[in-house]
Image (cartoon, rainbow, N blue to C red):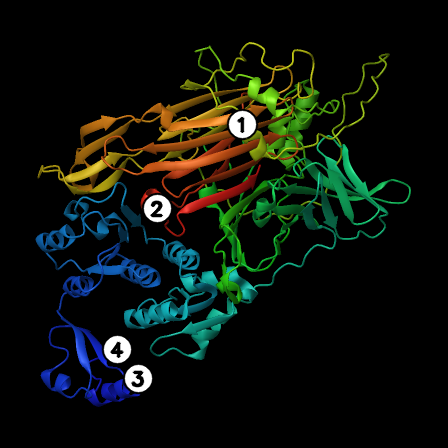
Amino acid sequence: MILSTSKTSATAINTTLNTLGAKSLYFVSEAATFSAAFRSSLPAGTTIALDVKSDSVFARSTAIAAALPVGPIVVGNTTVANSMNAAGAMATGQGLTLILLDGSETDATVQSFFAGRANHYIALVGGATTLKQSLLPPLPDNGLMILDTANVVSAFRTIALQQISSQAAASGSSLWTAPMNQPQSQALAALSAKVSKTSFLPAGTTAAFTTTSPSHEFIKLWGPEATKVTLAGTAMTAAELNSLTASASVTRVATPSWTVTNMQLGSGNYTITVKARSGAVKYQARTLGDAVAGESTSTTITVPGLPGTVTYIAALNASGAIVDTFPMRVNQYQEVIDRESTVVATIRDGGKHHLNWIDDRRVPRLITRYTIDPFMDDPNAPSGNPAGATFVAITCGTEYTTPASDLTKQWVYTVQILSTDGASCGTRGATGMTTAVASGINLPFMAFPAAAKMRSMDAAEDGETDAMPIPGYTVSDQLIVESGKLDAPPAPEAESSAQRAARSTSSDSDDPSPSPTSSPSTSPIPQPEPTSAPTPEPTATPTAAPSPEPGEQPEPEPEAVPEIITETAQEVADASPDSTYTDGPPTQARATALGPVAAAPGDDMPTMAVFYMQYIPGQYLGFPGFTGDTSKPFIAFGADNRAWYDLHGSNRTTNQAYVFFGSNYQIINGRDIGTSHKYKCGLLFTNCQLTDSGTAAVTTVGGTSGAGPTRAVVGQWVHSPNPVQVGAPAIDGVALWDLKRGGSTLRAEFDRMPVHQFWYGNFEAAAYLAFENSNYDPLCLFNGTQAVHIQGCTVAINTQF
């Protein structure tokens, strides 16, 4: 690309053309920019392949589009803040057609152009005001993306992450940038980034080159791993460039001196390797009930079965006393393929969180986190909103350690593999990874906040017995062991595949039942990052039994026995029957005895509930096309118009299971389909009138499940199209829950449209969100249809909760 102005001489341009050896030229200009004399003086042998001349940005962009293959379009508007910059970056980075508007074009002209673009995906960058949707032709169902650019840092970060995760696999650690108020410089920088397969984000304006610009914030995420920053612009100096490179001067926290370094599957067992602890002669892997699952005099502990129940590591001295402990959590690692997404997380040194993904291939990983407050009792401020997650870092390393964090909170981490290509990490090309998985880890709270501790003391004095959260326990641990108390039952008997297949999970009861909910009545208040100093490192201890009454002989303490996992969740699901469903919410009551009738391990475990649902935020989802009614020209589908925490509000589909452990173990399933509505609306979706409605078949939701006394596996799937739009692609997803003491997990894969939510809870507590994709894209509904695979549209997760 060569940019010229009215002051650029023909001689200078011709000299550059000769140097480059250019033979085919593309001219894009205002009507009177390149004179006849200039054109006649071009070097011999050059030809003009495309000559676009117009004073209208819309006319120029549509003329360029006419010379390109028909396909997806990115639309920007020069009158909408940050729209043109962001649209240009998105179109250039992904190689898509760019259409610009400036308000001077007529509706008829716009409608005429887009009439030839029916059935193609369109992105409106800048928000709904970028373009009147009534001027668009019929598009594929939900084939319209609207990217709000009001938050410029968030918008450009989304675009940059798309560049890394796209098929082009741009390097995120190397960056091109230009001042926000220099569109020509931005165009050159974006094109240079495209050619060099690196990322582009704008910096601040020349008058306000601040350290909070999109490029500065993105470089901070990379920190010392940022490799190169190139600044393009007019009148730029070393001062501006230095402010960018200074953003990489982020000091990463050193790895704790004692933590987990590796985990490895074996034959019928697995090993946990830790660093050596001064003064220790033995290391133990322990469970929530303080049972010793494995021990070793070396730093490698062998544990029978599969990973999933060990929650902390203890170091013992020569006399057998515990000298140190640390909490530990791991997501699902039951098969070899899980290793790519396995993350082991520990808490050390006064609240530092150490995340270690045990697959050491160098690929870019994005780390985000948010908090759950186990003591939150304000219904107007529900805890645990992933949409408010903090962006922590992007790294190519195999581990990451945070600064000391608030010990009174539960911390929820997501480690997202951005690309299976190593381009961002200095080794461009396939790494052999199968998919870019998002790994989830929940680290428990470790200390009471002052107010909660006082409340607990007051309750004890008043004789109240309400359970308080237990340090070292996540909210899921608390739910599944009933008040945090473990009775240390005998080792469970293995249940064969034939026994599971012979059992029926049906229920004849039609009685509705309660289900877990947060149900606040107003919008949530985002939870800020904690700033208070953490309390000293706590030591994990077994739960204390109640003291005997005077004169009463205490019962002997049962020997704690670890519960061993010997079958993978997938093996259990494969050997289990299809679920029998109640159409609507499942009942809380158990059916006729399906499991053993005698006392069994797991009798102390309360009923659990898991939910898989999808919803569309907002009241309406705009759809391109004309209704035929000039007073209500806009087509819209009814969205679900609910808050993120209102799981009992409107949903596209709901798949839920109630899991009973212990004696008479079983799983009761329910499903529901939301009704789809089609409207014709006035401007800004006002005065909408219903034109059609319908409900998809309930059989578009299903699953499989297998239960045991102390463990349950629930499989859920959805393949549900929009019933009021002919040829509409389906909402697709599959989930596999593995519920057990010491670390339940969720494996799922779904298209990134609409919002997919996964909740867990029980009948005595609020529900908690295990995962949701707050970033959704209507284009992704087409993923997998007609052998189409859209890069970045499949979300794969492996999360522990």
| Residue displayed at 19% across by 88% down | 44
Residue wearing tag 2: 787
> Where, by quadrant of the figure, is residue 667 drawn?
top right
- Amino acid type at circle 2 is Ala
- The local secondary structure at tag 2 comes to helix
Query: Where residue 258 appears, x then y in whole percent?
Result: 74, 52
Name which of mark 1 and mark 3 comes first in the sequence. Answer: 3
In the picture shown, does residue 372 fall above or below 189?
above
Which is nearer the N-term, disc 2 or disc 3? 3
Q: Is residue 519 left or right of residue 453?
A: left
Looking at marks 2 and 1 on the same chain, the residue that comes earlier in the sequence is marked by 1
Which residue is labeled 3 in the image? 20
Element carrying mark 3: helix
Say which residue label 4 marks: 3
Residue 435 vs residue 605: left or right? Answer: left
Q: Position of residue 756 (x, y in %)?
A: 42, 37
Q: Which amino acid lies under the numbered mark 1 shown in the image of this protein?
A: Gly
Say which element carries label 4: loop
Instruction: Examine the rendering and report whether any part of residue 722 can be seen.
Output: yes
